[in-house]
Amino acid sequence: MDILSLLVLLLSYRIEVGAKMKLSPESLTVVRGEEASFTCSPSSSVWTVMVWLLNGRTVLTISKETGVLPTIYPNVTAVLNKDGWRFVLNNTERHNEGQVTCDLQHIDRRTANLFVQEKGSVKVFGDNRLAFKGQSVLFQCQAAGWYPHPILQWQVDHRKVSQSEYNVSIEDMEKSLFTVTSNLSIMAAKSSHVDCLASVSALKTPLKSSINLRVVAEILQEEKKDDCTIPLAVTASLAALLLLVLLCICTALCYRQRRQAKANPQEPMRFDLSVLGRSSVAATTGGKVNLGYSGEAPAGADYSEVTLRARSQADRVTFNKVPDVVHSSSLSLHSESHTTEFQEEESSKNVRRTTTV
C-alpha cells in the first residue's frame, strides 16, 4: 500500500505541474517567408532551463537567470512577454515544417505542429475579350508553383461560379509543387468582369487574375447613349457648311449677272444713241427732226448703225395729216395763191416727205 500511495502522489504532482505549462498555438500554418511564433507559458517558477526543438533538433536555449543563450541559427530568437517566452522563427522555409517542442527540463515537454505552404502565381491567359451577344467564350486560368495544390475558383462580376460549370486539372511539378489549370465557358450576355482566384489556407487574401469581357451589342448601345451629342454636332456642321455654299453660289450668280449687264448693254444703248442723235440734230438746227430724212452718212460704223435703227423706228411711226391751211388774205397776188395751193396739195400727203423750214 505504501508503494502504491507513493506512485499516486508522484503522478498527481506530475499532472499538477504539467497542467500549469501551456504551448500555443498547438498548430500553425504559414506561407514560406513569413514569421512563425509559438509561446511557452510555465506558471511555476521551479524551472531552470527552457529548450526549444525544431523537428527534434535543439535550435534555442533559454536560461531563467541569463535569458536567451547564443545559437547557431540566425533566423531563430525568443522574446519574453507577460505570458512567457515567445519563440520566433523568421523567414520560414519548406524544411522548417514539422514539430516545434518546448521542453522545461525535469518538469514537462509540449509539442506543436508547424506547416509551411508555398504561394505560387495565378494568371488568366489572353487579353480582354470582345464577343457578340449570345456567343460562347472560353477562359483558361493557370495557378503554378503552389504547395499544397491551391483551391481555384472563378468569379463573374464578383459572383462565384458554381464548380459544376468549370473543370480543374492538377499536375505535380518539381520540388513537390503543384500546378492547377481550369477552363471556364460562359455565354456572352452582357459585358462582365471575370476573375480567377487561387489560394491556400495560410493566405489571408487569395491571389487574383482578372480579364474583361465586352459584348458588341452592348458596346454599340453604350456608344449611342454616351455619344448622342456627336450626331447633333455633325448635323449642325453640315447645315452650316451647306448654308455657306448656298451663300457663295448666290453671290457668284449675282456678280455674274452684273458683269453680263455691264458687258452687253446693246438695247438700252441703241435706244439712247438714237434719241441722242435726234436730240443733237434738233438742237443744232433749231427745228424739228424729220425722221424720214436721209442725208449723206458720216464716216463710221457706229453712226451708220444708229441711223439705220432711227429709220426703222421712224417707219413704225405714223403722224396725223396736217390740216388744210385757210388764208383770209387777198388773192391779188398770184404767187401767194400758187404757194397756198401747193401747200394744200402737199398737206394731203405723208409728212415723211416734207422738210423742215
Image (spheres, rainbow, N blue to C red):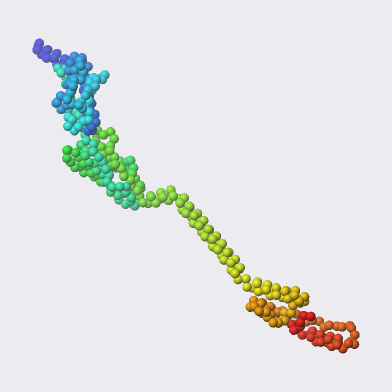
Q: Of 298 and 333, which appears nearest the observer?
A: 298
Does residue 284 appear left or right of residue 265 in this picture?
A: right
Q: Of 329 and 79, which appears nearest the observer?
A: 329
Choose top left, top right, bottom left or bottom right for residue 149.
top left
Vertical position of residue 341 compared to residue 99: above or below: below
- Residue 344: x %, y % from top left: 82, 85
Residue 274 in sight in this render = yes
Residue 18 in sight in this render = no
| Residue drawn at the location 28% of the way across and 38% of the way down | 207
Does residue 296 appear left or right of residue 87 in this picture?
A: right
Where's the C terminus, which quadrant? bottom right
- Residue 241: x %, y % from top left: 50, 57
- Residue 353: x %, y % from top left: 74, 84
Q: How many marks?
A: 0
Residue extending farthest to the front is 299
Where's the N terminus, which quadrant? top left
| Residue drawn at the location 68% of the way across and 75% of the way down | 274
| Residue drawn at the location 49% of the way across and 55% of the way down | 237
- Residue 180: x %, y % from top left: 22, 42
Choose top left, top right, bottom left or bottom right for residue 175.
top left
Does residue 112 appear left or right of residue 298 in this picture?
A: left
| Residue drawn at the location 9% of the way across and 12% of the way down | 3
